[in-house]
Amino acid sequence: MATSNPMAGAGIKHRRRKIVLLVLLALLLSAALTTRWLLQPERLAPAVLNLIGNALGLEITASGVGEYRLRGTPQLIVRGVSAREPGAATPVLTAERILISVPWSTLRARGRELTATRLELDAPVLDVAALQHWLATRPAGATRIPTLTDGLRIIDGQVEGQGWSLREVRAELPQLSAKQPLRAQLRGNYRSGGGVQAPFDLALTLVRPALPTALGLAGEIAPTGGNWRLPARLKLSGQLRSEAGMQLQRFRLGANARYVARDTAQSFALGLGGSLRVADGQVELLPLALALRGSGAVPTLDAGGQAQIGPALSVALQGQLAQWPDAWPALPAPLGRSQAPLPFALDYRGPADLSGIAQLQLQRDNTRFSGRFRLFEMQSWIEHFEQGSPLPPLRGSLSAPRLEISGAVLEGVEVRIEDPTIPEQAPIE
């Protein structure tokens, strides 16, 4: 009859305990080595940046690493950051400093989850042409929107386009999620190659952060030229898309503005509508509908046409003035007695600060005017008409079947005014 050996059983159990302890020791050692590896910022930084870059289809590198924190939510600061399309010469984005706070779950997911707690960018520079190229190469629906549970902050940012830029940009987003509307506060200064600046402080809302999406803007902007300012409070809405450049379709803009130049200040209301496109360094409004409601020297008018804004400005409008403003020099009879609206065509192609020459065709009943002038010189002449020259600073012609001037009745009137400072050019058709 067989009997068990208690000593042998105890030996087996002892050996098993040793094996288990060795396995646990090996696991602890592996975990310690892994943690030590992760604790080295020169290894942790590329790992985190690679997770983000792989999700966005970008190569993201950093030339310097600052401090890091692994207690609680991991936090990393990197410097000299560059994000570009693989093989591209121009980065989509660069930044002097980026702080990113990423939960452990994101690190363990190795890119399957793109959730961060907080993102901060110091002195980032966004290149619009590189951004548009990257967006155009992305498959439909492929761009993943990261989640930022504690939001985003940008200070001293720049956006560089062709012939224009945004400087001193500050942005605050309380949170970012692909499933939630995006709300942000934006501050900065628009600058054009033509010398126009426009400081702004705007609240931005996107129905969703991915394109296409509905956009809303509200706040203050103050375009400034060489000798004029146009502070305005505005509201803008439209459908934002990335087709043939960046487009804002079915956009509507309403603004209460004040035109200030020298000792002049005029308030008015402005409405714009149409389609806006940003491409090749130009902001294009085509088609464009415009409504202006003014008082004093600011006319009330409705018009349609198109505009291009970049290093230079191009505007072509056709519409009608509801009436001749009372603050303008009085028209001779019978023009001054007529209540008919005044159809007009306005064309301007020149510097963005409006210092160039405009062409205007204007009609009331059977009287027609066609001329060329500088906007600010004409405005100054209107303001000082009683003290200045009776002839306006322009080159053009006026034809009327009948005019009454100082008690005299003139029939078949043809008048030409030739200001030598205005170059000759065929009038607009």
Image: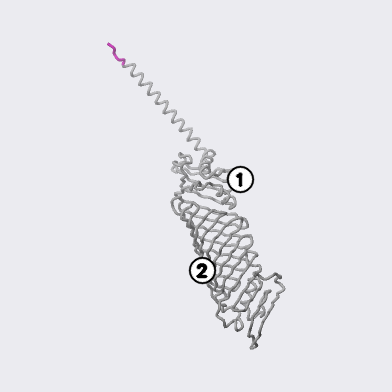
Prevalent SS, magenta region: loop
Task: Relative to 3, say whether 251 is above or below.
Answer: below
- The residue carrying pointer 2 sits among few (fewer than 14), some (14 to 19) or many (20 or more) residues within 10 Å by Cα, namely some
Which residue is at 68% across, 80% downward?
A: 414
* Image location (x, y in percent) of residue 122: 55, 51
Q: Farthest residue in the right direction?
A: 420
Give residue 37's mark: none
Any magenta on residue 159?
Answer: no
Any magenta on residue 2?
Answer: yes
Q: Farthest residue in the top direction?
A: 1
* Image location (x, y in percent) of residue 379: 62, 74
Task: Relative to 174, say whether 349 is above or below.
Answer: below
Q: Farthest residue in the left direction?
A: 1
* Image location (x, y in percent) of residue 255: 51, 67
Give residue 256's mark: 2
Residue type, mark 2 in image: Asn
Give residue 88's mark: 1
Can residue 96 be seen at all in this image of the molecule? no
Task: Relative to 167, say whether 2 is above or below.
Answer: above
- Dot 2 or dot 1, earlier in sequence: 1
Left or right: residue 188 versus residue 311 is left
User: Mark 2: which secondary structure?
Assistant: strand
Can residue 43 be seen at all in this image of the molecule? yes
Residue type, mark 1 in image: Ala
* Image location (x, y in percent) of residue 189: 57, 59
Front disc: 2 or 1: 1
Is 22 or 264 nearer to us in this picture? Answer: 264
Numbered range of the magenta stretch? 1-5
User: Mark 1: which secondary structure?
Assistant: loop
Quarter placement of the N terminus:
top left
Q: Quadrant of residue 350?
A: bottom right
Quarter placement of the C terminus:
bottom right
